[in-house]
Amino acid sequence: MFDARWYSDTYDLYRPSVAVSAGGVQAVTVPETATASGQSCRIFVGRPPAWVIGREGIDQDYDAVMLVPASRTLQPEAANQQPDHVTVSGTAYVVLSCHDARNQGLFKRALLRQVH
């Protein structure tokens, strides 16, 4: 297990929900209150490389990298689901990808894009 003292930041998680109307129209709603608050993380914001090869081989433009304990579940942007939103130090982000960093089950690495 990764040493929890290494996580000096916290994030609030906002998990969107999808409602389907009788006519089949989908409406995505991001909750106003956090689904989970005060979750441990370590965030790196600044000027990361503009493009990176994502887990599925797709180029992704991102604004920050967040490391979380391996037990955390973050839903990334995907065709069949809406991405989670997180807030760190008052800045809102959407989760682009999240995967086991170094494939050792110690922590996960999430790429984030800032919500303007």
Image (cartoon, helix red, strand yellow):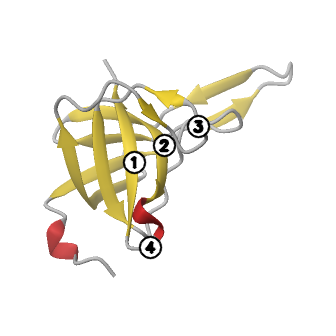
As rendered, which of 18 and 109 lies closer to the eye?
A: 109
Q: Which image quadrant: the C terminus?
A: top left
Using the numbered discs, state the Cα–Cα distance from disc 3 to disc 1 in whole angstroms: 15 Å
Q: Quadrant of residue 68?
A: bottom left
Tell me which numbered mark, 3 or 1, is placed earlier along the sequence: 3
Which residue position is annotated with label 1? 110
Question: Which-is-in-front pick, marks 3 and 1?
Answer: 3
Q: Are marks 2 and 1 in contact (CB under 8 Å)?
A: yes
Q: Are marks 4 and 2 in contact (CB under 8 Å)?
A: no
Using the numbered discs, state the Cα–Cα distance from disc 1 to disc 4 in whole angstroms: 15 Å
Quick one: label 3, few (<14), some, or many (20+) residues within 10 Å?
few
Which residue position is annotated with label 2? 97
| x 43%, y 51%: residue | 35
Quick one: label 2, few (<14), some, or many (20+) residues within 10 Å?
many
Image side of residue 18 versus residue 25, left or right: left
Marker disc for residue 57 = 3
Quick one: label 1, few (<14), some, or many (20+) residues within 10 Å?
many
Image side of residue 71 versus residue 11, left or right: right
Marker disc for residue 104 = 4
